[in-house]
Image: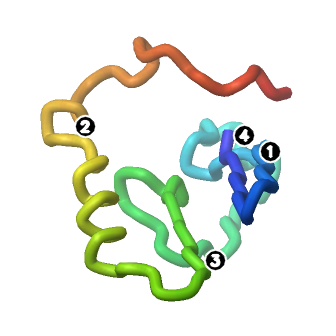
Amino acid sequence: MAISFSHAGTSKQLAPAGIWVGAMSEEERQLHFGDTLPSIPDWDAEWGDRVTKLVFIGIDMDRAEIERTLDETLLTEEEMRMNWRELKDPFPAWS
């Protein structure tokens, strides 16, 4: 499940944003799209359309500090090879 998170001031929204095409089985893709997948920007051979995109809007933000902090949160090679299904999902079950 793709998730949309928005945070502006004291307003925060977390909501389902659809299903990743890359996470669908071949049967599900065929059911939804037939023989032709839609053009998906940034399609990755391994991860498909499963991406994270962040947008920061503000005044006097320290871009270098933001990038450094975000880089620290990236998964290590070992974490990338883990079975992520074993991790506790902090999000509610959405249908």
Amino acid at pointer 3: Ser
CA–CA distance in space, label 3 to label 4: 17 Å
Relative placement, left or right, of 88 versus 81 is right
> Would you name the residue on which mark 4 appears?
28
Residue under the point 35% across and 69% down:
66
CA–CA distance in space, label 1 to label 4: 22 Å
State which quadrant residue 19 falls in: top right
Q: Earlier in the sequence, mark 1 or mark 4?
A: 1
Amino acid at pointer 2: Met
Extreme residue in the bottom direction: 60
> Would you name the residue on which mark 2 appears?
80
Please say whether residue 34 is visible from this viewpoint: no
Residue 10 x/y as whole percent: 77, 55
> Would you name the residue on which mark 1 appears?
15
Q: Earlier in the sequence, mark 1 or mark 3?
A: 1
Q: Quadrant of the N terminus?
A: top right
Residue 69 x/y as whole percent: 29, 59
Tell me if mark 4 has few (under 14), some (14-19) or many (20+) residues whose alpha carbon lies within 10 angstroms of its own. Answer: few
Tell me if mark 1 has few (under 14), some (14-19) or many (20+) residues whose alpha carbon lies within 10 angstroms of its own. Answer: few
CA–CA distance in space, label 1 to label 3: 24 Å
Relative placement, left or right, of 9 versus 73 is right
